Amino acid sequence: MRNLLVFLRKNYFILLFLLLETVSLSLFFNFNEFQNTTLYNISSTLTGALNSTFRNISEYFSLRKTNQTLIEEMAKLHSRLPDAYYKSDAYSFYRNDTVYLLQYRYISAKVISNTTNKRNNFMMISKGSLQGVKNHMGVIIGNRIVGQVVSVSPHFSWIMSMLNKDSKISGKFKKNNQLVNVEWPGGNYRYGSVKEVPKHVDIKAGDTIITSGNSDIFPEGIMIGTISDYTVATDENFNSGTLLFSTDFNSLGYVEIVVDLMRKEKEDLKETFKSQ
Amino acid sequence: MTTSKVIFYNVLRFFLLILLQVLILNNIYLGGFINPYYYVYFILLLPYEIPGGLLLLLSFLLGAGVDVFTNTLGLNISACLAMGYARPHVIRWISSGPDSLIGNTPSLKNQGMKWFLYYSISLILIHHFVLFYLEAFRFTEFFKTFLRMALSSIFTLLLVLISEYLLYPKEK
């Protein structure tokens, strides 16, 4: 027993180091479990409050850009209003509208902290579970992709932005609906990479990539980016390309969270399929 | 300097450096490969006489302070702990003896350029190595991560040297 105490006293520095390092590495690798704890909620609330204070000051510097985005959005929405359509009463006929049931609702939120210079980037937004934000909801700005919600506290949520090694988005070519995977390889935040493009697909610079709607996170047709460069592989079955993101991740002021009202129905369907 | 004054300055530095890191440095974009982690300056500037346990505990808290702001809990903590653990060993290796250490805390002014460069480069490299490789955690990105680590280390070192010259200027 005494020998043990002597050993502990002699080596306490390295032992304490190993203990703390183990704690921290297990925190790092089991982060998803930690996110459900009260301590996490408290720390989120604190950092959220500090981030919003700082953001309240710094957002004045980007008002011009924010206004520009809002005006563009408004013009887009105006062009969808009934007033923008040609009215003809000469050929009136009855027709069942194919668009009648609301599937998506959007919650707007302010970005209060955001990074683009790390390998794994997250952003914090000013809406949380009290406003209806839930895990795994998609996040967009205008009609462009931003990321998805990964954890929620009562007033704030963390969003894993597209600029993260764990973000893999299922996209497709707008011109022929061929499916591709979009990732971010790190480095420049403007460029992502398109993986697993089948050989027979004619890939060209300037091709538009949109979300496929195959995952339950994003609606179909959200802009991801345009192909800026591509390589034709000689030995593999897939080509790959570089993609210029439509979203400027470095200047996000506001984002919209996509609430899929039919999500529960889809999940229930999957459950019943599994249990069969 | 009295002990209470030392504690006061270190506590102040602790919070100022975390705020500077998370509110300003994390938001600066320099080509996607340079991302300085200047907050480690806190560990560099702790007194020589600090007990090992306290050194590790402060490293842990410093890392945690930065981690809660980037949603990467454990990442900066691990890097800071490695740096804190290495610190006494590095000091022992590069100094000729306990008598060669002048003053309470490591500084460019007291120890000279060569000593301070060895000291800060090795500790910054240890911190950045753990941080960038744990963050990427992929062997396919080995060289890309190496480039990011090297460039960021240089930038962190530059910031540390600039602050040494600005905050503790040589007396004439």
Image (spheres, coloured by chain):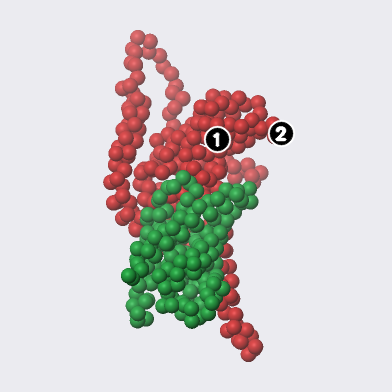
- Mark 2 or 1, nearer chain start: 2
* Disc 2 element: loop
Residue A246 position in % (x across, y down): 45, 35
Crowd around label 1: few <14 · some 14–19 · many ≥20 (10 Å): many
Residue on which the image places disc 1: A242
What chain is the green one?
Answer: B
Q: Colour of chain A?
A: red
Three-letter residue code for mark 1? Thr
Query: Who is closer to the viewer here, A233 or A77?
Result: A233
Q: Is residue A36 visible?
A: no
Q: Is residue A167 left or right of residue A52?
A: right
The numbered mark at residue A140 is none
Q: Report which quarter residue A40 is drawn in.
A: bottom left
Q: Give the residue at the far bottom of this rendering.
A: A2
Does residue A130 lie above or below A24 as drawn?
above
Q: Give the residue at the far top of this rendering.
A: A90
Residue on which the image places disc 2: A235
Quarter of the C terminus of chain B within the rendering: bottom left
Three-letter residue code for mark 2? Asp
Q: Is residue A117 left or right of residue A271?
A: left
Q: Are marks 2 and 1 in contact (CB under 8 Å)?
A: no
Does residue B33 lie above or below A224 as drawn?
below
Subunit of mark 1?
A
Query: Who is closer to the viewer here, A94 or B125?
Result: B125
